[in-house]
Amino acid sequence: DISVKWISGHEGVEGNERADKEAKTAAKGRANNSLRKRLPTFLREGPLPISMSAAKQEQKDITKKQWGRLWAKSPHYAHTLKYDKKLLAGSF
């Protein structure tokens, strides 16, 4: 039997620290604990599909870096920097 119950926090719960560590490892894409033969056929070869959330975040990061490089080359960059150093942090 498997039982699932809510617990208030992770500390002091047997096995929970390990589960938390494994979840963080998997979330970072470093887990390699699935046996290939247990995966569905379409997932056994090639990279796993990326989630929409991860794809959007990656595109946002790429766009922000590209904007930073282009802005640093702009003739307005140095002038603006004199007045507003926070502009470089840009959030969009």
Image (cartoon, rainbow, N blue to C red):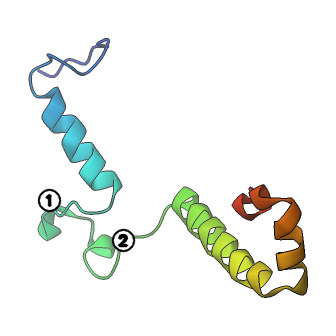
- Numbered label tally: 2
Q: 54 or 78: nearer the eye?
A: 78
Which residue occupies 90% across, 79% down? Answer: 76
Task: Tell me, yes or no, whether the two marked residues, 2 and 1, touch with CB atoms within 8 Å.
Answer: no
36 to 27, vertically: above or below = below
Which disc number belongs to residue 48?
Answer: 2
Task: Please tell me how crowded label 1 is: few (under 14), some (14-19), or many (20+) other residues with Cα within 10 Å.
Answer: few
Q: Residue at x 32, y 82 (%)?
A: 46
- Provide residue 45's location: percent of width, then percent of height: 27, 81
Q: Which mark is residue 52?
A: none
- The answer to whether residue 38 of the structure is visible from this angle is yes
Q: Amino acid at mark 1?
A: Asn
Q: Residues within 10 Å of mark 2 (few under 14, many from 20)?
A: few
**Circle 2: residue type:** Leu
Side of 33 relative to 81 (left or right): left
The residue lying toward the viewer, choosing from 79 and 47, is 79
C-alpha distance separating marks 2 and 1 = 14 Å
Lateral position of residue 92 relative to residue 49, left or right: right
Residue 1 at x, y percent in the picture: 11, 21
Camera-nearest residue between 12 and 36: 12
Q: Considering depth in this image, is 36 or 64 the residue closer to the camera?
A: 64
User: Residue 73 appears in which quarter of the rendering?
Assistant: bottom right
- What is the number of the mark on residue 33? 1
The percent position of residue 74, horizontal first and vertical second, equals 84, 85
Outermost residue toward the front in this view:
82
Residue, x 20% and y 17% (percent of image)?
Answer: 3
Relative height, residue 44 to residue 13 (above, below): below
Residue 30, relative to residue 1: is it above or below?
below
Q: Earlier in the sequence, mark 2 or mark 1?
A: 1
Question: Mark 2: which secondary structure?
Answer: loop
